[in-house]
Image (cartoon, grey):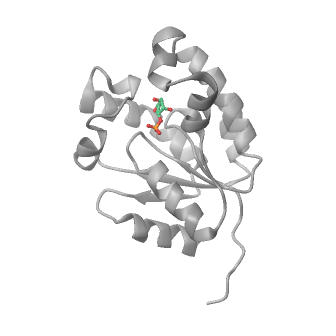
Amino acid sequence: GPARPVPLPIVLVGPMGAGKSRVGARLAASLGVPFIDTDQRIARRHGPIDEIFEREGEAYFRVAEREVVAEALREEAVISLGGGAILDAATRADLGRLAVVRLDVTPEAVAPRLVGGSRPLLAAGGLERWTRIRDERRPLYDEVADLTIDTSRRSVARIVAQITEWA
Ligand code: S3P
């Protein structure tokens, strides 16, 4: 059908491994708008994320993240936020006015996706740690999400179609 304007930005949130970056890139390409991955922007500016955590600590990372997120949210793009970005109250307030899609995933489905990554919060603790972090943050994701999609058993193409129909 005829192209219909979608609200921009569209922001993807959710736990590590839920597919925010993969879905975001495909969604942006399909809409013909830029894709911003805030983790990538942080890394470009401050170096690899695991090194930031190791050298400067998580609190420093969160400050850098807030700055990059605040900037990104002003752009007409598809934006994928790091899993912990919603810990910041100012970020949650910003998200209140925007189209926010929360991608979720079960521990069973996320396990193979986390193998070999360089996620400092999972370096020790693995799947149990992932599950605990995801459960702790659930109320924050609930607070900001306008649409929730379980990506566990859906293809990226299906998820992109679902978001496009909703937007
Ligand atoms: C984090 C998630 C990561 C990254 C950092 C911290 C978190 O992003 O921002 O390692 O606190 O959940 P992804 O959700 O893209 O893995």
Q: Residue furthest right?
A: 74
Residue at image position (55%, 23%) is: 47
Q: Quadrant of the C terminus?
A: bottom right
On the image, the x and y values in percent for residue 2 come to 67, 88
The count of marks equals 0
Classify residue 123 by image quadrant. Answer: top left
Residue at image position (52%, 56%) is: 25
| Residue 167 in view of the camera | no
| Residue 39 in view of the camera | yes
* Relative depth, front residue between 27 and 141: 27
Q: Residue furthest bottom?
A: 1
**7 left or right, relative to 162:** right
Relative height, residue 134 to residue 27 (above, below): above
Relative height, residue 12 to residue 138 (above, below): below
* Relative depth, front residue between 41 and 154: 41
* Relative depth, front residue between 143 and 69: 69
**136 left or right, relative to 95:** left
Relative height, residue 30 to residue 21 (above, below): below
Q: Quadrant of the N terminus?
A: bottom right
